[in-house]
Amino acid sequence: MSAGDQENGGDKPREAAVWPEVERAERLARGAALKWASGVFCQPEHLERLSQYRKRESQRTASVHARLKSMVQSYLEGVGWGLEQLREARTELKEVSHTLKAAELESDGNMDCVKSLDRLREVSINHRQLLAAVSNLPRLYSVQSMVLETERLVESRRLLEAHARLMDLEWWQDDILWQLHGAAGTPGSALSSEDQELVVKYFSGVGQLVDALAKELWAVVSSSLALARQNPTPFVSAVRIVEREEALDQALLAERGGSGGGSRPLPPGRPRCWRATFFQVLEEAVSARFRSVSYLHTRGPGLAGHLSALQHGIMTDLATVRHLLEHCVPTHYQLTAAYLRASHHCLHTHLAQVSSWDLESGEIFAVLNWVLHIYNRKSGPRLAAAGLVWNVYRETQTCWSCFGSPDMMGHPELVTDVE
């Protein structure tokens, strides 16, 4: 064997080791060819067609080679086009890099010029703030007189007029703060604390007016039962103001409630949530009515009179709320139901306090009889079990079949609200 043959023979195992799939595919092809040839040339006379088969297979092999060559050529052309695009992109990136470096050098050279403009920027900001102040001078001059006039309106309980003037003052304050905020520089920049404190201090009377108006409003709400029988106009005005404030709170929260740095801030003291405060004051008024009932002579025989006074006071107040105050507020207030809840809570607390005393059997029976028969059968057991003697309650459990006295919570006009 020559040296070339040895070399070629030595390359085959190396190629087979590198590409084992090629050797396996070749073995499979040879096996398939032998199987096909053994089936076609199984008899000697079939060898006459050997030349035809050879020619046909040669043509098929040539066709396969041509298709492979065309496909490889197409792939090579695509690879060449891609390489050309990469070379062009590389060239463009070099140009962009050189341009950026030149721009950076030029920017570094202009830093001194930019720093020299800081003083001009400060002057411009001061100019815009002064312009905003000059344009609002008529408002600023009339603030003190507006505050004094609004104070007189509040003191005379002309609440709607006072609230209208107060809203004007708040709008002026908010508008001036926003103008100064916009004149402070770029959008989103905060107003300096000194300027903001100066504006707030100048409009300090507005915050005092808000407190004074709120004090008058809650005084009206607290005395709503007495006003309803005499002149409900102040109570109606108070409810209208509460609804105005609630609508304004919701509108401001919807407009400026975003957390973005460029959003307009809420005015000072917003939101006020005066509707929630309205119901809190109403509950405190109910509690004060309970405290106003005399505790004198409540021991012994006086306990029944005390409970009778409670019944009369509660029913009188509920009738006033039902027939007078309910028509002075929007329907979604459900004022009668709110007053019922507050009365029930105060009554529960009061009876728990009474039951904590050292009561005699007659007094315990009087309390249980009032709770089960007069008040309401649905709340009676809970009130009784809250602090009264449970054994006495079990002895009087035969009274449980009654629904509730029409003299109190079983009244036909209160059944819906009680339910």
Image (spheres, helix red, strand yellow):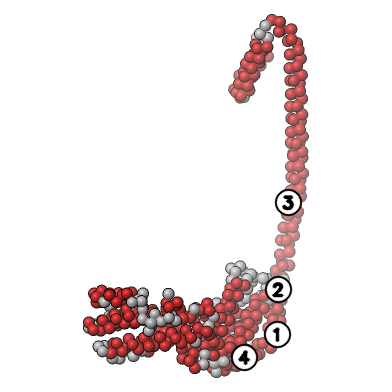
Disc 2 packing (10 Å; few <14; some 14–19; many ≥20): few
Q: Amino acid at mark 1?
A: Val
The circle on residue 242 is: none
Q: Residue at x 64, y 70 (%)?
A: 262
Q: Secondary structure at mark 3?
A: helix
Q: Residue at x 29, y 87 (%)?
A: 304
Which residue matches tag 3?
Answer: 97
Q: Secondary structure at mark 2?
A: helix
Q: Give the Cα separation between the discs numbered 2 and 4.
A: 36 Å
Q: Amino acid at mark 2?
A: Arg
Q: Position of residue 57 (x, y in %)?
A: 73, 17
The circle on residue 134 is: 1
Q: Nearer the viewer, residue 18 or 346?
A: 346
Q: Give the Cα separation between the discs numbered 3 and 1.
A: 51 Å
Pick whichever of labels 3 and 4 is earlier in the sequence: 3
Pick whichever of labels 2 and 3 is earlier in the sequence: 3
Mark 2 or mark 1, whichever is nearer to me: 1
Which residue matches tag 4?
Answer: 146
Q: Quadrant of residue 417?
A: bottom left
Q: Amino acid at mark 3?
A: Ser
Residue 406 located left or right of residue 112: left
